[in-house]
Amino acid sequence: MQVATAISGLSRWWKEYQHALAPARSLAYVRIIFGALMVVSCTRFIALGWIDAQYIMPRWHFPFEGFEWVTTLGNPGMYILFGVMLTAAVGVMLGAWYRVSSIVFAVAFTYVELIDKTYYLNHYYFVSIMAFVLCLLPAHRTLSVDAWRRPHLKVDAVPRWSIDVIKIQLSIVYIFAAIAKMNSAWLFDAMPLRIWMPANDTLPVVGWLMTLWWTPWVFSWAGMLYDLTIPFWLLNRRTRPYAYVAVICFHTITGMMFQIGVFPLVMTGLTTVFFFPSTMSAEDKRTTWVPSWFSKNRVQSVASSAKPTQARIPRIVGYVMGIHLLLQLLLPWRWMLTSDDLFWDENGYRFGWRVMAMEKAGTALFTVTDRETGKRGYVDNAEFLNSHQEKQMAMQPDMILQYAHKLHDVYEQRGVADPIIQAEVWVTLNGAPSKLLIDPEVDLSREQLGWERNRWVLARR
């Protein structure tokens, strides 16, 4: 009986929630903040010369599996692409030709990120997600150029879930970042903070803390608890202001300590969504102007009967958002099907919100052997990769395998008969002594990535 009552109550709540409204300006604020942050990010990327360094000068790139068709556009193609992306970001911020601007930005940004996994960062992944979410929502129906150009587009309300989906997405990022820290290395060994913190002893204000022996443990536990609980503090109206101060402090310190680009700024900016109204107030619902000479009863009658103009979102969009959130909840766990030691083999590591969860470095020495003559030589990685590509490749098995296949093709073109590609890769994780990551006897050119544990990746034990 109690179960039936609970199910009935839940069903009733869900029907009411589907029709609940939020002020359209709340969604517009998210659009404006996101667009402004993307204008800053694109401008910064161009100004720092990273288009040349990352997408034009490198000889080779490491595409994501299944996206090998995504390639660099060269010069001037990449500059044109970034120009289009920056223009689209301005359009998103202003709500100008919003549907086109938001879709163009989402596609262009994601295309750039798919060119080379070397530069994968959680905040780039987050930006792609937010860009695709926003291009499906009516974030341009108020406080926008579109609403000014075409007054009939202007609305007062949007479905409440269109605001809540952004809050849920942010909460997923925080909570999975906490889950990634729930391991003995982070909590009990204070790794990798014991390595990172002493190197930041020159930071203003907090630098002296970095040298104290107990600080890494305090920061490890505080970081995990912050990520785990901050969404709930932000959801509570009474604790929200204090929680946001914690957000500012946390991301300011991490931004000073680590080279993580605009991620602290993006998270600090978008977390303000928790302050935006997600329900319609009485003032929001009063859309009809009532002359002062009306009687009191008449004013109340008109005000109560007036309904806010609202943006209708196709039902299919709601289903897409539901599927998206479900995937976001499942994707970080896929490593359980593919990996025995996630931080070591990194099979399923990406797209799981594991932000700054480990310190890992490696060295990779590749050999090429002519299968017919047995003649053997060593590979100069600098001939094919830039320094950052080599650094990332030397500790990530999937990139090592991609590199081996590329070496096979290039040396075969140079006249080596069906080259045998082998690698001696030594990796250190969280300050531990280096160990072999790849079986040096295996011909990597004959291996493929699989869903099961790859036999050519050695166990850490």
Image (cartoon, rainbow, N blue to C red):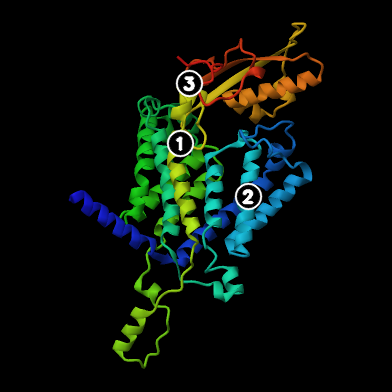
Query: Helix, strand or loop at disc 1?
Result: helix
Q: For mark 3, does the 10 Å Cα neighbourhood hold few (<14), some (14 to 19), or many (20 or more) residues? A: some
Upstream in the sequence, badge 1 or badge 2?
A: 2
What residue is disc 2 on? Answer: 107
What residue is disc 3 on? Answer: 431
- Find residue 11 and report its image quarter: bottom left
Query: Helix, strand or loop at disc 2?
Result: helix
Residue extending furthest toward the right: 415
- x, y (%) of residue 98? 60, 62
Q: CA distance from mark 1 to mark 2?
A: 23 Å
Q: Is residue 460 above or below residue 1?
A: above
Q: CA distance from mark 1 to mark 3?
A: 25 Å
Q: Is residue 295 above or below residue 154?
A: below
Q: Is residue 27 above or below residue 367?
A: below
Query: Helix, strand or loop at disc 3?
Result: loop
- x, y (%) of residue 161? 42, 58
